[in-house]
Image (spheres, rainbow, N blue to C red):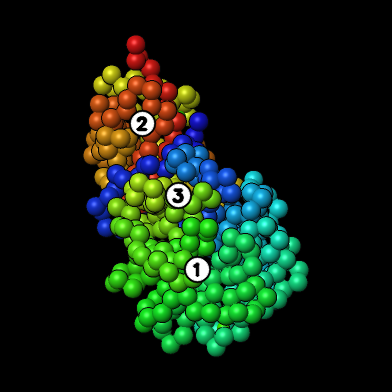
Amino acid sequence: MVGSYYVESAQVGLGAVGVEGVTPNSLNPTYSPDGSKVAFVSDMLSSLDIWVIGVDGSELRRLSDFSMDVRDPVWSPDGSRIAFSTSRGGNPDIWTIQLDGSNPVQLTTGPSDDDQPSWSPDGSLIAFVSGPTGTNDLWTMTADGSNPRKVTNLSGQENHPSFSPDGTELVFSFTQTGVSNLMIINVDGTGLRRLTTGDVRDFYPNWSSNGIVFSSNRAGGFDLWLIQPDGSELQPIPNAVGYDPTWSPDGNVIAFSDLGPGGAQNIFLVNLVDETIQPLTQINGFFREIDIRPGVEPNSVNPKSTEIIPVTILTTSKAKGELINSDATRIDPLSVRFGPGLAPEAHGEGHIEDVDGDGDLDLLLHFRTTDTGIQCGDTEVTLTGVTFTRHHIQGSDTVVTVGCR
Ligand SMILES: [Ca+2]
Ligand SMILES: [Ca+2]
Ligand SMILES: [Ca+2]
Ligand SMILES: [Ca+2]
């Protein structure tokens, strides 16, 4: 097959680490209600779209394709939909989309900027922020977009609402004169109280029965912190540096975003039980379409042979119905590395030709099997590289290993 954008595992793309350049970002994680998947936004294809990945790093797939940035996805408690914000309607509004990528529905309209949705635990309400930047207020609405109600009207910026586990309160970040602290309010707008204090920036609160996790610079850089809703037990999570924390449904793991080894913003998981931190995504390049053994299928590789494997990086265009506009001739052939062994181009040069005969010029490269590090049983091989404008790229294609007995 021609290289798929839906790779088997996101544990790829480290070949270009160390090369200065532009990398795509993955952020804003949200757990599925069954805890098996995380949705997030990433611009690894072009604009920020919603992607979904298994918590074991498998089955990465793109959910939305709006050709327009999407932010702050949040999974519905019944698992059927994801709410998010996008300017697809002209200015930021709250939308929902089905898990198969179908049926996008716009819930808010009008000139105000509506974003940062949060779903109530019973699924009936969506809280969000609305208003001009700098004076955002908190609102709720029925999850179908009806009955919008203003919850706060503070003379500062309310951000990142998150429902209490019983659905009766909201925690949010309140910014005024450069200071951001957490506040709690009843969903009906009564009972406003301060949760955190200090001349600091407390952002992204996320509430579960284990407490409220948030990101704060109260110790210098932005780290993850925990606090109980009564203000007790304020404490940092050891070694968890980053933003956007969100609880797993069982309360044992927190997903968050931070800069990864390649300089890209990626999703990490901190396990509160064994205090380990694992990367969930290591997406350090913009996706490109590649074809191992151009025009031939399956892509047989004998790991024990000394043969040269041809690989094409294809030029693609939206005008032809392809996912993105990408010009393969803008990739530096000497920057490209192929396979787990990070094989360089075997002849030290690329060949620019229309490999697939569709009228545009592609980049044909060759790699020595012995350099690629491909092992018997491997089913997918990844290529990384950098464009002449220093954008990191990556692509994957399937392989079938032969001669292994
Ligand atoms: Ca306000
Ligand atoms: Ca092929
Ligand atoms: Ca093409
Ligand atoms: Ca072509």
Task: Decide if residue 95 is in sight here.
Answer: yes
Q: Residue at x 49, y 70 (%)?
A: 230
The reply to whether dot 2 and dot 1 touch (C-beta < 8 Å) is no
Label 2: element kind: strand
Q: What residue type is labelled 3?
A: Asn
Identify the residue under disc 1.
Answer: 229
| Mark 3 or 2, nearer chain start | 3
**Residue 329, labelled with which disc?**
none
Query: Which one is in front, 116 or 367?
Result: 116
Identify the residue under disc 2.
Answer: 310
Query: Which one is in front, 352 or 243?
Result: 243
Query: Which one is in front, 198 or 319?
Result: 198
Q: Which amino acid does label 1 sit on?
A: Pro
| Residue 157 placement (x, y as % from top left) | 52, 81
Q: Residue at x 65, y 78 (%)?
A: 189
- Gap between marks 2 and 1 measured at Cα: 59 Å
Task: Please identify the quarter of the rendering in which residue 383 is found.
Answer: top left
| Residue 181 placement (x, y as % from top left) | 45, 77
* 183 sits left or right of 191 in the view: left
Q: Residue at x 41, y 32 (%)?
A: 380
* 377 sits left or right of 346 in the view: right
Identify the residue under disc 3.
Answer: 252
Task: Please identify the quarter of the rendering in which residue 149 is found.
Answer: bottom right
